[in-house]
Image: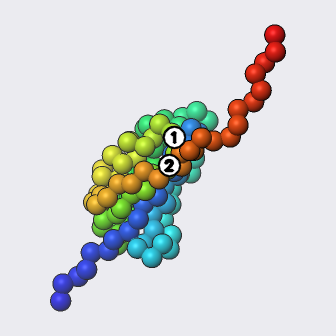
Amino acid sequence: MQKKKKHGIAYIRSTLSNTIITVTDSKGDTKTWSSSGSLGFKGSRRSTNYAAQATAENAARTAIQLGIKSVEVEIKGLGYGKESSLRGLRLGGLIISKIRDVTPTPHNGCRPPKKRRV
């Protein structure tokens, strides 16, 4: 009997001040999570590419210990750590099968404020 590879979903939320990575199983139950702040990065260092890569490596190592081998990735946000967090997941040992960018974009957004009178 062949052992089935476990598949999961990795959600990357990259904001301008932090990067949060959550790894779930295929049903959506959270298995592990990691953030730049929880790894000890403080202040403006949390938003760097290096912090995002270290966060992704930490989440990937923990997910592999829990038996998850491959992941689909959903990226959301405008932060600096989008590409480097993908690199970190690969360096951590996870196989990436699909990448989706689910960043919400306005179709015209809110009405801008009135023009300033001079």
Q: Give the residue type that dot 1 points to.
A: Leu
Looking at the rendered structure, which numbered label has been put on residue 103?
A: 2
Q: Which residue is mark 1?
A: 78
- Is residue 6 depicted above or below 106 in this figure? below
Quadrant of the frame with the N terminus: bottom left
The residue sitting at 36% across, 48% down in the picture is: 86
Q: Is residue 68 left or right of residue 52?
A: left
Check the image and name the residue furthest to the top: 118
Spatial CA distance of label 1 from label 2 is 8 Å
* Residue 110 at x, y percent in the picture: 68, 40
Q: Are discs 1 and 2 less than 8 Å apart at CB?
A: yes
Looking at the rendered structure, which numbered label has been put on residue 65?
A: none
Q: Is residue 78 left or right of residue 59?
A: right
Taking depth in this image into account, of 47 and 64 the one nearest to the observer is: 47
Residue 9 in view of the camera: yes
The residue sitting at 42% across, 60% down in the picture is: 10
* Residue 113 at x, y percent in the picture: 75, 30
Q: Give the residue type that dot 2 points to.
A: Thr
Instruction: Say few, some or many: other residues with alpha carbon within 10 Å of mark 2 (under 14 / 14 to 19 / 20 or more).
Output: few
Label 2: state its secondary structure: loop
- Is residue 65 depicted above or below 18 in this figure? below
Q: How many marks?
A: 2
Check the image and name the residue furthest to the right: 117
